[in-house]
Image (spheres, coloured by chain):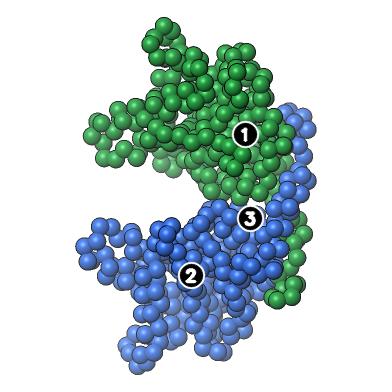
Chain colours: A green, B blue
Amino acid sequence: MTYCVGMMLNRGLVFMSDTRTNAGLDNISTYGKMKIWEAEGDRVITLLSAGNLATTQAVVSELDERVKAHGERNPSVLESASMYQVARLVADTLRDVIARHSDTGQRASSVFNATLILGGQIAGGPPRLFLIYPEGNFIEAGPDTPFFQIGEIKYGRPILVRAYDPDLDFNEAMKLLLVSFDSTVKANLTVGAPFDYHLYTVDSLVRGDTGRVEQDDPYFQTISQGWGDALKQALDSLPAFGSMSGN
Amino acid sequence: MTYCVGMMLNRGLVFMSDTRTNAGLDNISTYGKMKIWEAEGDRVITLLSAGNLATTQAVVSELDERVKAHGERNPSVLESASMYQVARLVADTLRDVIARHSDTGQRASSVFNATLILGGQIAGGPPRLFLIYPEGNFIEAGPDTPFFQIGEIKYGRPILVRAYDPDLDFNEAMKLLLVSFDSTVKANLTVGAPFDYHLYTVDSLVRGDTGRVEQDDPYFQTISQGWGDALKQALDSLPAFGSMSGN
């Protein structure tokens, strides 16, 4: 499995992905699941992927090939005129890759499936964030659904639902995401550190802060250990059952 | 779906279950998923069920029939000599019910599946808590795994993992469970209030406090609304990303 989040804030886009891949519990590896394309001053595009590793790597490779092969009829992610067209291109590539592997007569196409989060900004347009399905269709984030999760999304969802605020600054968003990732890691072996992140500032049109948070990172350790105590204090702050009339 | 939790505390056993059943999003009903058998002074047994409603109702009905038909060769849950034997009886009944429906040539047996939490105490023995699988085998709670969840378990798991303590009193445990259930309800339409609960006091051998928490229960509303603020304060209490050396 995998856990990735793409989040739309007033000050920009925040992306985080884990790095664990597994083919069974006895075959665990570390692979980055975040890809960034950048043309400074023109566009910054971030792609997060969950699902079959061969599929997601093929998607990224095909998109990369197209970036390198200039002059073709079809524009690459660095040439598409809008984020919507980038999303179409990525979605079509994903659908084609899945279809190609499924055509070989394998038992089920679902094993080749993958889901993607795509976000970025192109000069002249606003930042946009998409969730791309294996069927090649996609949805866009908006004020009602300002963040997307893919992969093992359930454990880390409640804290995002409760604490997300479009006015969060990047440091607060990183804290929130690390709590969400830590809750997931603590409950599910198929998600694991290190975590990659990218903090894109709206209208900057250059790659923002990127980095990798390791399991033994002192800040992550502080969050991971402090969150348990903080949760207990949060529980303590609520009234006890039976203390209110009617119970 | 469903969400049920059985929890072992030093002062007794705590059970909570939601009441939503659905056959598609347009066919939602309310059914209790908690069954209590009691022989005052001798035993109290609680059963929580998740899965196919026809299967879980059949299991409870078969166990009830056996309780009414005295004098048979096979003892009922009110006659079995130990909680282990009760668990065997319930597990065998579950497996038989699933096998019977699967034999009719339906497409897949999984649609008839169900998972159960069984807990209780019989005079002369300690309180015991079991998780029973559709295959008819089961595992028992212990100090390392002091609570079981069935159904839609992921959203509500992180708070249980963090805040469970065997020394919790019943009011604290109810608060913890209501937070866990609220987190699940907020994220998943297939789990819904009201919530049934049973608080069994160790060595009492009588049914403990039981009741139903409705969606509009003032205490539940206080917890549901207060938890969001409490979580945000908990997040605020942790240091900001970038505030520690090395980041």
The quarter of the displayed image where residue A39 is located:
top right
User: Residue placed farthest to the top in the image?
Assistant: A71
Q: Residue A95, image x and y in percent?
A: 36, 30
Q: Which residue is mark 1?
A: A8
Q: Is residue B60 above or below residue B242?
A: below
The quarter in which the N terminus of chain B is drawn is: bottom left
Q: What whole-number distance in Å separates the C-alpha atoms at marks 2 and 1?
A: 37 Å
* Residue type, mark 1 in image: Met
Q: Which residue is mark 3?
A: B159
Q: Is residue A212 above or below residue A188?
A: above
Q: Residue A27, image x and y in percent?
A: 43, 37
- Same-subunit check for callouts 3 and 2: yes
* Residue type, mark 3 in image: Ile
Q: Residue at x 36, y 70 (%)?
A: B54
Q: Which residue is mark 2?
A: B30
* Residue A143 visible in the shown view: yes
Mark 1 — on which chain does it sit? A
